[in-house]
Amino acid sequence: MYAILGRTLLVAVLSTVASLVISFAFVPMMGGRVAGAGLVMTIVCPIAISIPASLVHFYQADRLRRANTALAEARDALEKAYDRLQYQARRDALTGLLNRAAFMDEIAASSNDGANGGLLFLDVDHFKSVNDRFGHAAGDEALHLIGAALQSLAQENDIVGRLGGEEFAIFLHGASAERMLDHSQAVREAVSAIDFRHPSGIRIPLGVSIGAFHCAPRFDPAEALAAADRNLYRAKSAGRNTVVA
């Protein structure tokens, strides 16, 4: 408010000065003299007009500026909220990895771009026993740790997702069949090496069975995942904690 009053007084002073300059410049040219009531009117009129007009103008301008600022802040907050919702809609809440729908969308986009690569379908071994023996909180923590391990091994263009329950999937963008197998073994070993312990101190061993399938360019995502799933079933049947391609 003080800023508005200050600007209003400045306008009043400048208006008065301008009025005096004009009066003293033109009135004598017309044969008159600036004095008495004329001088008073020269000073009073600009003050009487400029002060209320300036107050209203600056007050409305200040309100408009505040409204524009609030609108811009609300727009920024809305955009951030929308971005968060978009992110959350594509992410698994427990692990932060892509959810099933987002993972399938991403590998479909890779296929449409003509990319090849390795598709890994993972299932946590004996996960039900972890929940049954140590509780669902322990199971959730196990999934979180496994998800973090998978993400830490991924390269820049690789796609990592949790497909649901204890199932995960990885698409190794542009990977050769050899890299696919090497990465599968690295994932299996990384999960086995997780030092996961119950609050009582008991170590809970973790392992994953992996079905791997090498995807040619323009592959069908659903068919590729089904092929990897068949290999996963074979890995389970072979004794778990192993890789089948």
Image (cartoon, grey):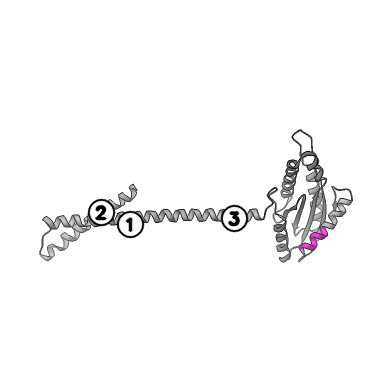
Location of mark 2 (residue): 12
Alpha carbon distance from label 3 to label 1: 39 Å
Alpha carbon distance from label 2 to label 1: 13 Å
Location of mark 3 (residue): 83
Q: Residue at x 30, y 49 (%)?
A: 5
CB-based contact (under 8 Å), mark 3 and mark 1: no
Q: Earlier in the sequence, mark 2 or mark 1?
A: 2
Q: Secondary structure at mark 1?
A: helix
Q: Secondary structure at mark 3?
A: helix
In this rendering, position of residue 66 left or right of residue 135:
left
Residue 33: x and y in percent read 11, 60
Q: Is residue 83 visible?
A: yes
In this rendering, position of residue 72 left or right of residue 146:
left
Location of mark 1 (residue): 57
Residue 177: x and y in percent read 81, 58
Residue 189: x and y in percent read 80, 45
Foreground residue among 41 and 139: 139
Judge depth for marks 2 and 1 and give the one in front: 1
Q: Which stretch appears magenta?
A: 221-228
What amino acid is found at the position of numbered circle 3 in the picture? Asp
User: Magenta span: helix, strand or loop, mainly?
Assistant: helix
What amino acid is found at the position of numbered circle 2 in the picture? Ala
